[in-house]
Image (tube, coloured by chain):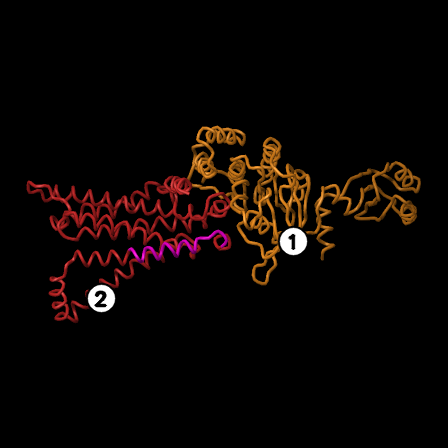
Amino acid sequence: MIRDILTVMWKERKGLFRQGGSRSRALLTLLVPVIMLAIFLPWQIGADWVETYWSILASVLIPLLLVGTVIPESFAGERERYTLSTLLASRLPDRAILFGKIAMAVGYGWGITLIVLIISLVTVNIAHWDGQLMLFTPTIALVNIVFSLILASIMACLGVLISLRASTVQGATQFLMAATLFPLILLQVAGFLVLQVWREWFDNFMNTLATVNWTQVILIIGAVLVLVCAGLIWAVMARFKRARLILS
Amino acid sequence: MTETAIRIENLTRDFGQVRAVDNLSLEVPSGTIFGFLGPNGSGKTTTINLLLGLLEPTSGEAEVLGYNTRTQADKVRAQTGALLEYPGLYEQLSAEDNLEFYGRVWRIPALERQARIEELLTHIGVWERRTERIAKWSRGEKQKLAMARALLHHPPLVFLDEPTAGLDVMAATALREDLAALATREGVTVFLTTHNMAEAERLCGEVAVIRQGKLVAVGHPDELRARAGGPQVEVMGGGFNDDVLSQLRARPEVATADIQNGHLAINLHEEIDVAPLVSLIVNAGVRVEEVRKGKASLEEVFLTLMEEER
């Protein structure tokens, strides 16, 4: 099984930067979030980037963006380009195909996130050097590593579920992006409204937040995300079946 | 390997109210190119999907290379190769990488895999272009590569679903020649679906004809021809009259004699020397310009069978 998963990962890696044709276009798409989150924001935010939870922004956005574009290509793309039926007619077990594709997408999203975090450290140290090396605290480093992995996995599973229903890569990508970015946008709008309309309530809320132990909050959020992730993995395993796929 | 590569017993598959395969029973002997003929939508692709264990039958059983397709589908897929409706190649990858991937899928050891890839790409004449991305290759070249992929792991049985569909005459002919050469050289059993009768006639040692999921006929192309009628004689010329028709119809070896499109068309019960018949026609005052003797083509057999089923 492991060997079959590695075989699928080999193929996915070969095709990763060539989906839709151009390797340079794919690299260019990758460059925008990397510059934004590895250079621009850390440069602007300074020491707070490593001392507070600002860097979680990179651990949330990069897996969402990267995995969100790779997974529809990998799953809906196989069907759109009529390669899925041949793959299903091979000796590969369903789960090797599923986990090989997911592992490559998650590895890609997670790996790039970790690289971005390292580059962001270099940026902060160069831009705000005060004679002492600035590093993430162990808790922040751990939170970044774990959160980006969980989010990449959640995004991959969501992507698989959506791709299995979508008829095209474009349709799957659009739906997946809307489904994941819409709650974030909604949160931003809600925050803006709260600031405008319920200013007093917001001030009280912020005072309460000041007393909150953020590490505990993040641990709780992390635990919830792990549960969500486990549920989604179970759901994709139930959905990704040869007999269903050949009919779709 | 068993003597019978595929054994199908009362296989049926329904999609809702539609019966795609209807009580199909069939045996495919090992080592032959077996043609599975039928018009579009007759259930050919569904049959392949059932034989590969990709679909579960509604009822009935099938065995491929001795494995039950319902309970041992993974073993069936491990032992067979397939070129389905589409080439199923990764166009962003090179020809070599496409075969490399499937070589890894079938767990061919690295050195053997490299040698086999070189052998197959050389055989289909694209070894020099092995590192090119195949996106810009012609359809015929892709189809050849897909056929090479199906044979990569030396499977004893290969399923080919309309391999020449959509190809121009040149590409289709080249692919047929490659298929025949590869099948002979590799000694594989080929289960070939097609609605191209000339293709089946040229390649297949045995054929089955299905219509609306039901088996209509099965046998060697010559046997099917015999079912559709005996040899035919066509006489071109002039002066055909009722008298010559009456004389011909009175002969025991003649099944029918008619004037069709200005020619005299005679169907015989069996293979005979036609000289006495030609002599009879000449003596009856017919001006004979040309005499052609032939068999019904598989296409004519197919059309006859389709007509009978209606």
Q: Position of residue A91 (x, y in %)?
A: 49, 43
- The quarter of the image holding the C terminus of chain B is bottom right
* Residue A57 visible from this viewpoint: yes
| Secondary-structure class at tag 2 | helix
Residue receiving disc 1: B10
Q: Quadrant of residue B159?
A: top right
Give me the residue at 59% from left, 63% from top.
B17
Magenta stretch holds residue B260: no
Side of B130 relative to A181 (left or right): right
Magenta stretch holds residue A235: yes
What amino acid is found at the position of numbered circle 1 in the picture?
Answer: Asn
* Numbered badge on residue A190: 2
Would you place residue A142 above or below residue A227 in this image?
Answer: above
- The quarter of the image holding the N terminus of chain B is top right
Q: Position of residue B254 (x, y in %)?
A: 87, 45
Side of B68 relative to A24 (left or right): right
Give me the residue at 16% from left, 67% from top.
A195
Q: Main secondary structure of the magenta part?
A: helix
Q: What is the CA distance from the residue labelled 2 to the residue labelled 1?
A: 63 Å
Side of B86 relative to B239 (left or right): left
Per the rendering, the colour in which chain B appears is orange
Q: Position of residue B203 (x, y in %)?
A: 65, 38
Q: Position of residue B266 (x, y in %)?
A: 83, 45
A2 or B240, which lies in front? Answer: A2
Would you place residue B110 above or below residue B62 in this image?
Answer: above
Q: Nearer the viewer, mark 2 or mark 1?
A: 1
Per the rendering, the colour in which chain A appears is red
Q: Which residues are magenta?
A: A226-243
* Numbered badge on residue B74: none
